[in-house]
Amino acid sequence: MKALFIGGNGIISSECSRLAVERGWELTLLNRGVDSTRPPIEGAESLVGDATDPGSLRAAVGSRTFDTVVNFRAFTPDQVQADVEIFAGRTGQYVFISSASAYRKPVARLPITESTPLRNPFWQYSRDKIACEDLLVSAYRETDFPATIVRPSHTYDPTLIPMDGGWTVIDRMRRGRPTVVHGDGTSFWTLTHSRDFAKGFVPLLADPRLRGEAVHITSDESLTWDDVARGLASAAGTTADIVHVGSSRIGRAIPEWADGILGDKAHSLIFDNTKLKSLVPDFAATTTWARGAREIVDWYDAHPEQQVVDPDLDATLDQLASEERA
């Protein structure tokens, strides 16, 4: 079986690549050839190309055909339209990595299933993913283009700290500075380790039942945002001095966080993985957040060059916490 992963060395895709090779796939990775913090994927062929440039993608792939093409790096409808044109008749399955942030916000009913409507008025990233999905659904209906849509939620690996602010947050915890958490900290969230995502994802490759279908892949562990902060602090050998600040207020103070908080993280998200488990009966997400948080801290402690503190963000978080406690 032959697969092309566009991307393949990212947070989600690297574990998928390793597992695909382990399971005997003849895997080709296409990326820009930029050095990654993650080790190379042994056993995979590498092509150099730009996923955002149809000409570059077409030249890199040449006349090859694949059983499955997965694009981990498509974010806009024009990118997906180009993929439809390039891979029509050249693959038995095209997998688009969408996002669970596309599900309706505000959330009207839990748990979220694949039939939950798609609508996100807060975040352009999510609206673009929805538009990509719409294009693929039309291509499937009109020309039988073999599209499969996969929606990850918040997926992480040891290199990704799944709280806005990255290493600055852990550094503040270790210095005893307040940890700013949006809202009242009680909204539910789902974190999925990329290792677990891969266990659900790779068995879906070349599955003919997935033509025209969408499925999400998440952990079944539900955490509050206070739980996320406390788990990270515990892994860092300290405790979190949590200060709750309104989501909109955080967005005004730190505009680059606004869309992700208001369009996703401020809402309780609990997912029903029944569809995935019907397709992959042995799927189970086994990496708890407690374990995942330890892996993150251990990785950063072993890579001090990655321990970058943003002094402006540090000051802004102090200001937000101080104003909240005043």
Image: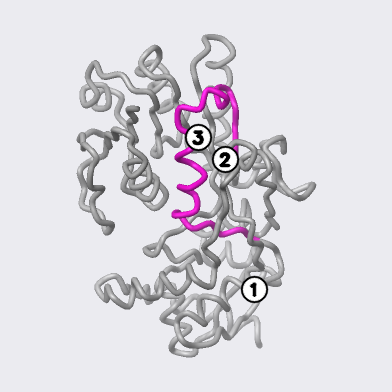
Q: Secondary structure at mark 3?
A: helix
Q: Amino acid at mark 2?
A: Val
Is disc 2 placed on a helix, strand or loop?
Answer: loop
Mark 1 is on which residue type? Val
Q: Is residue 4 magenta?
A: no
Quadrant of the rendering where the C terminus is positioned: bottom right
Residue depicted at 60% across the width and 42% down the height: 281
- Per the rendered image, the range of residues in magenta is 189-215
Separation of residues labelled 2 and 1 (CA atoms): 40 Å
Rate crowding at label 2 as few (under 14), some (14 to 19) or many (20 or more) other CA atoms within 10 Å. some
User: Which picture quadrant has residue 81?
Assistant: top left
Disc 1 to disc 3: CB gap under 8 Å? no
The answer to which image quadrant residue 114 occupies is: top right
Q: Earlier in the sequence, mark 2 or mark 3?
A: 3
| C-alpha gap between disc 1 and disc 3 | 41 Å
Answer yes or no: do the residues labelled 2 and 3 have beta carbons within 8 Å?
A: yes
Q: Disc 2, disc 1: CB below 8 Å?
A: no
Of badges 2 and 3, the one in the foreground is 2
Using the rendered view, name the quadrant where residue 228 is placed.
bottom right
Amino acid type, label 3:
Leu
